[in-house]
Image (cartoon, rainbow, N blue to C red):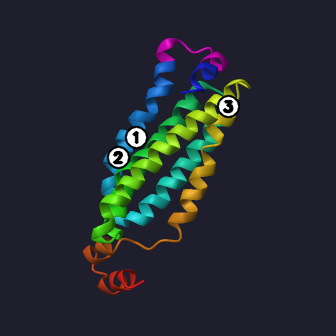
Amino acid sequence: AAAAIFVKRSFALSTLMEELVVSIVLIGAMVGAIAGGMVADRIGRRATLVWAAGIFIVGSLLAPVSTGVVVLIVARAIIGIGIGFTSVTAPVYVSELAPPQSRGMLIGLYQFALTLGISLANLVGYGLATQQAWRLMFGLAVVPTLLFLGVILTVPESPRWLLAHGRPKEAEAVLHS
């Protein structure tokens, strides 16, 4: 949100183009959410989250180096797809991996972390607004994504997904780890 005014100035955007730059993330997220569920069912929850992080990293690196509005729109659409993949897969993964007595709390914690992340992004945007550093605002999104990727690489696949795909021994190993 904090970057919008500076992006508009940098690329001399019309109102329509500014709206497209902002809303393309939501369109990408819708596409990512629809596709993410199918991908998660096919390749696994953990693998889908790894792919989501990779997609998000690509978009977050492409956005700040955009030389024109078309590249920025593509970058933001890519970011949206990563968001969509994560938004549909992460809660499912958490609920499938968590013990029954902790599921509600952990899903609530996921929602809290999401809200906290949005708040921190707005604070960073506010802090960088005086410098009109919209490229840095977009590029800094790589930092939490790398942390997310680092965590995802350390956790197992969902036992439910493993069982559904005929891998009971692996599911049993996850349940006992």
Structural crowding at the residue carrying mark 3, measured as other residues with C-alpha within 10 Å and reported as few (<14), some (14–19) or many (≥20): some
Task: Give the residue type that dot 3 points to.
Answer: Gly
Earlier sequence position, callout 3 versus callout 1: 1
Q: Which residue is the site of mark 1?
A: 29
Q: Nearer the viewer, residue 32 or 144?
A: 144
Q: Which residues are magenta?
A: 8-17
Crowdedness near tag 2: few (<14), some (14–19) or many (≥20) residues, C-alpha within 10 Å? many
Whether tag 1 and tag 2 are in contact, CB under 8 A, the answer is yes
x and y percent of residue 58 in the render? Answer: 58, 47
**In this figure, which residue is indicated by the disc labeled 3?**
127
| C-beta proximity under 8 Å, tags 3 and 1 | no
Which x, y percent locates residue 153?
Answer: 53, 68
Point out the frontmost of discs 2 and 3: 3
Q: Which residue is mark 2?
A: 33
The residue located at (48%, 37%) in the rendering is: 77
Q: Amino acid at mark 1?
A: Ala
Q: Is residue 176 above or below residue 165?
A: below
Task: Using the image as rendered, state which of residue 96 and residue 62 is in the foreground.
Answer: 96
Q: Secondary structure at mark 2?
A: helix
The extreme right residue here reads: 131
- Secondary structure found at label 1: helix
Between 96 and 135, the one nearer to me in the picture: 96
Image check: 94 left or right of 58?
left
Distance of mark 2 from mark 3, alpha carbons?
31 Å
Real-space CA distance between mark 3 and mark 1, rounded to the nearest whole angstrom: 26 Å
